[in-house]
Amino acid sequence: MVGDLEKSSFSNIEQQSLEFVKYTLDPWVVRLEQAFKRSLFLPEEKKRYLIKFNVDGLLRGDYQIRMNGYAIARQNGWLSTNDIRELEDLNLLSDEEGGNLYLINGNMTKLKDAGGFMKQPTETEPAEDPPEEEKDE
């Protein structure tokens, strides 16, 4: 029976919610966005302004999958802490707290410093010889 939730689990309820957004809401959202753009803007304004409904909150899905996605994005340098916090509707961190730093893996190096180890001076001072131990005869 369609819509029978008697033997449903959390995962298929969650999947049903995602399908509702994708197959039911999304077509209507697109129609409304297009109608608003057509009705509200002059021809020269249509290129400058964008109307977009934000349904991201409805598509958030499973917490663990979302956090794993954020971790991958953070470690590969394409999301900052503040980017993630904004997606999660959290307060942003200041620049002093590192909120807008983009990091990459390799002990989480700053993106701008990536490869810095390759720029070390080529001439290094020779290592000191270890002191010789006296032998007992």
Image (cartoon, grey):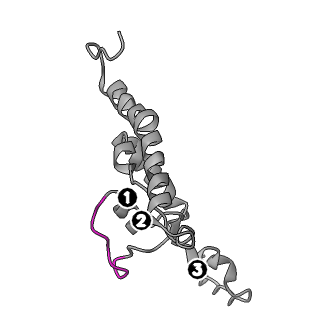
Query: Residue 46 versus residue 26: which sits nearer the camera?
Result: 46
Q: Type of residue at label 3?
A: Glu
Compute the Cα span from label 3 to label 1. Answer: 63 Å
Q: Nearer the viewer, mark 3 or mark 2?
A: 2
Dominant secondary structure of the magenta stretch?
loop
Say whether residue 87 is left or right of residue 122. Answer: left
Q: Label 2: few (<14), some or many (≥20) within 10 Å?
A: some
In this view, 12 is above or below 82:
above
What's the magenta region?
89-97
Q: Is residue 36 left or right of residue 6?
A: right
Residue 72 rendering spot, x and y as whole percentages = 50, 53
| Mark in front: 3 vs 1 | 1
Which residue is identified by label 3?
Answer: 133
Q: Which residue is mark 1?
A: 87
Residue under label 2: 83
Depth order, front residue of 123/55: 55
**Contact (CB < 8 A) between labels 3 and 1?**
no
**Dot 1 lies on which element?**
helix
Res 26 quadrant in image: top left
